[in-house]
Image (tube, rainbow, N blue to C red):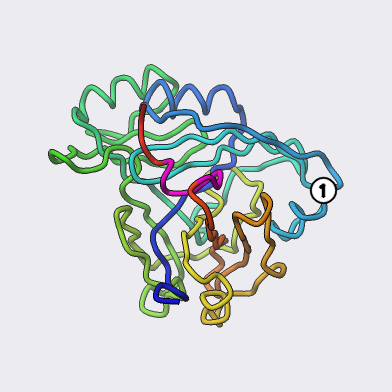
Amino acid sequence: MENAGRVVALNHVGISVADLEAARRFWSEGLAAAEHGAFGWPVGTVPADESLATEGTAAEVVLVRTDAAFMELFAFSSPAPARREPGAPGITGLVWATADPDDTRARAIAAGGTSLGERRVSCPDGTPVTLVAAAPDTPTGLVGVLVQVADADANTLPTIPGPVEVEVAGGATAAPARPVDLGVNHLCLDVDGIDVVREGLESVGWHHDVTVSSGGIAAVCYGTTGDGVLVELLESRSPEAFLSRTRLTHP
């Protein structure tokens, strides 16, 4: 297969939130992300626990989309979320493109965000968002992800092509947060040839075997990199798959 065994792009980031309605208001009303659906699971759902390598999980989830990527908003009812420790490895910031960054900043603050200075806001769950001006005919919404690990030169994430740019920096000094803890908890990569990609990422400790879902039109696998970053591989085998990139368009 011509495209077997490659990372295609960033598909989505997952964010653990304290208040699902507050998060929806910030990302949808403040930053103009479009809602894409919702799901949830109760305590005792083994596949969810295996994916997150955490026992006893339960959550309600709302999905939103921008021009170039999706986002998952997780409201965990079990285990109880806590604030992330400063210096924990993982995603420490997002970059958001918009036609008018100053107007978007004002709307984001009105929708529950906190000002972090010029063209920067924090979402209600603590993740900094840097607002940038979108050039003509380029994506708006999520266009950048900032990842912190202990040593950027020894980074174990695979190369992730655009349109969402993933920037890795050093400086992580704390233990990894739990997936339920507040803030961005994982990044999901679109892949072709999930088994080949998985086998090639030797530094990742995979939590489970590849799972085929949705009647065979999608395959997923979660793991943790040697840097302590939670990652998901997603192969959409049909344009009808729930998080297929073909769905990344606004009405």
Vertical side of 149 occupied by 42: above or below: above
Q: How many marks?
A: 1
The picture places residue 186, in percent across and down from the top left corner, at: 54, 54
Vertical side of 48 occupied by 156: above or below: below
**Residue 22 belongs to magenta span:** no
Quarter of image, res 205: bottom right
Residue drawn at (46%, 59%), measured in percent from left and top?
A: 190
The picture places residue 83, in percent across and down from the top left corner, at: 60, 43
Q: Which residues are magenta?
A: 240-247
Using the image as rendered, state which of residue 175 and residue 185 is in the foreground.
185
Specify few, some or many for label 1: CA neighbours under 10 Å numbering under 14, 14-19, or 20 or more. Answer: few
Using the image as rendered, state which of residue 21 and residue 183 is in the foreground.
21
Q: Is residue 236 left or right of residue 96?
A: right
Residue drawn at (52%, 46%), measured in percent from left and top?
A: 243
Quadrant the C terminus occupies? top left
Using the image as rendered, state which of residue 26 and residue 171 is in the foreground.
26
Which residue matches tag 1? 45
The picture places residue 103, in percent across and down from the top left corner, at: 23, 22
Quarter of image, res 218: bottom right
Q: Is residue 26 left or right of residue 136?
A: right
The picture places residue 245, in percent across and down from the top left corner, at: 42, 49
Callout 1: SS? loop
- What's the residue type where badge 1 is placed? Thr
Residue drawn at (19%, 30%), measured in percent from left and top?
A: 99
Residue drawn at (38%, 17%), measured in percent from left and top?
A: 110
Quadrant the N terminus occupies? bottom left
**Residue 242 belongs to magenta span:** yes
User: Magenta-highlighted stretch: main secondary structure?
Assistant: loop
Instruction: List the single residue furthest toward the right.
Output: 44
Instruction: List the single residue furthest toward the top.
Output: 110
